[in-house]
Amino acid sequence: MPKVWISLGSNQNREYNLQGAIKALRQHYGNVLLSSVYEGTAIGFDGAPFYNLVAGFQTIESPHKIVQVLHSIEDSYGRVRTNNKFTSRSLDLDLLTWGELILHEKGLILPREEILIYAFVLRPLSEIAGLEQHPVLKQTYQELWSKFDATSQLLREVYLKF
């Protein structure tokens, strides 16, 4: 059964929305492993700071089905979808990896490119799955994080219990 990693983020009613998302993920997928939660400034727009973390679980569901489940959870917490990627959001759940699968389809790219771009994705992923390798680069997430320049993407660990 493939191991799946997803990123979770919110900058609106952050703790409530993330708690609800994690509860929904656990109801649907069972045991869900969670990273620490990190607070960071909004990137690409002026907005409230985000809380972000990474969650992992195993499932036989296809990547497409997982994305449907994630969108359903987002929708249940008031997610408004726009063409603007850089905007505030109640809940943002993104499929990062599905086992070692490399996939390039319209609307679904695995591994997700944001892993290598954003500290709020790579840092918690390196914490929770540090010894796993990026399917394309064949470097561990710890190695990738150690080389990452996060000076313009400062994060602060937030102690929340889910």
Image: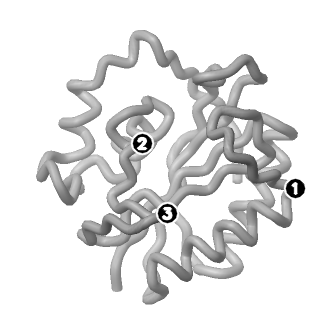
Which residue is rendered at x = 79% and y = 40% of the image? 14
Place of residue 100 in the rendered image (x, y in percent of width and height, measured from the top left): 24, 69
Label 3 is placed on what type of residue? Answer: Gly
Circle 2 — which element? helix
Label 1 is placed on what type of residue? Answer: Gly
Q: Is residue 33 above or below residue 43?
A: below
Label 2 is placed on what type of residue? Answer: Glu
Q: Which mark is residue 78?
A: 1
Q: Residues within 10 Å of mark 1 (few under 14, many from 20)?
A: few
Q: Is residue 5 above or below residue 154?
A: below
Q: Which quadrant of the figure has residue 4? A: bottom left
- Image-based side of 21 in relation to 65, left or right: right
Whole-number angstrom distance, CA of label 2 to CA of label 1: 23 Å
Dot 3 corresponds to which residue? 107
The disc, 2 or 3, on the residue closer to the chain's N-terminal end is 3
Place of residue 146 in the rendered image (x, y in percent of width and height, measured from the top left): 23, 27
- Image-based side of 130 in relation to 120, left or right: left
Whole-number angstrom distance, CA of label 3 to CA of label 1: 21 Å
- Image-based side of 124 in relation to 144, left or right: right
Task: Report if the CB atoms under discs 2 and 3 are less than 8 Å apart.
Answer: no
Q: Which quadrant of the figure has residue 10? A: top right
Place of residue 7 in the rendered image (x, y in percent of width and height, measured from the top left): 53, 51
Dot 2 corresponds to which residue? 114
Q: Nearer the viewer, mark 3 or mark 1?
A: 3
Task: Please identify the residue farthest to the left as the structure is shown.
Answer: 138
Q: Residues within 10 Å of mark 2 (few under 14, many from 20)?
A: some
Which residue is rendered at x = 56% and y = 44% of the image? 53
Circle 1 — which element? loop
Q: Which mark is residue 66?
A: none
